[in-house]
Amino acid sequence: MDSNKSFNEKCYSLLMQIPRGKVVTYADIAHHLGGKAYQAVGNAMASNPTPIIVPCHRVVNSNGAIGKFALGTAKKIALLKEEGILIDEHKDSAKIVNLDKQRHTF
DNA sequence: ATACTATGGTACG
DNA sequence: CGTACCATAGTAT
């Protein structure tokens, strides 16, 4: 189909619009793409050819969990914390604090 | 067409 | 609050 840009390409464009210190949920991105493609969004990040150009580390789950990262979940947490995002670290799990307040609006 | 997945939501204890 | 199970959407092979 004309599908100018695969779903995956749209995800990257949206991700690049996220400013530092903000985070977005997969559902948020999927919703902006016009559907419930939560999985497709994560899939796109996994296929992401440029994990640094695209701030895929600013994407978290809607339940506040960090999720995963191409370079390692620990790396993702470190990046988020360094950007000023508050993370609630437990024993071996981490979740976003005040996610709704740090959520970026497209 | 089938399998897999960086999820989400609801249910249960 | 934490864990479990199911449903949903899209990509890759």
Image: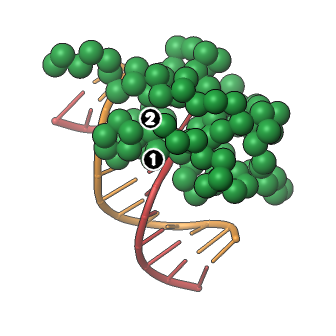
Chain colours: A green, B red, C orange
Q: Secondary structure at mark 2?
A: helix
Q: Is residue A93 visible?
A: no
Are dots 1 and 2 in contact, CB under 8 Å? Answer: no
Badge 1 local density, few (<14 within 10 Å), some, or many (20+)? Answer: some
Same chain letter for marks 1 and 2: yes
- Which residue type does callout 2 highlight? Val
Chain at numbered mark 2:
A
- Which residue type does callout 1 highlight? Ala
Badge 2 local density, few (<14 within 10 Å), some, or many (20+)? Answer: many
**Quarter holding residue A33:** top left
- In this rendering, the label closer to the viewer, 1 or 2: 1
Q: Position of residue A4 (x, y in %)?
A: 27, 15
Mark 1 and mark 2 lie on one chain; the one further toward the N terminus is: 1
Q: Residue at x 61, y 55 (%)?
A: A100
Q: Position of residue A85 (x, y in %)?
A: 76, 42
Q: Position of residue C3 (x, y in %)?
A: 62, 66
Numbered mark located on residue A73 in the image: none
| Residue position marked by numbered label 1 in the rendering | A27
Q: Position of residue A79 (x, y in %)?
A: 76, 31
Query: How many numbered marks does the figure carry?
Result: 2
Q: Secondary structure at mark 1?
A: helix
| Residue position marked by numbered label 2 in the rendering | A41
Q: Residue at x 32, y 17 (%)?
A: A5
Q: Residue at x 40, y 20 (%)?
A: A9
Q: Is residue A25 visible?
A: yes
Q: Is residue A21 left or right of residue A36?
A: right
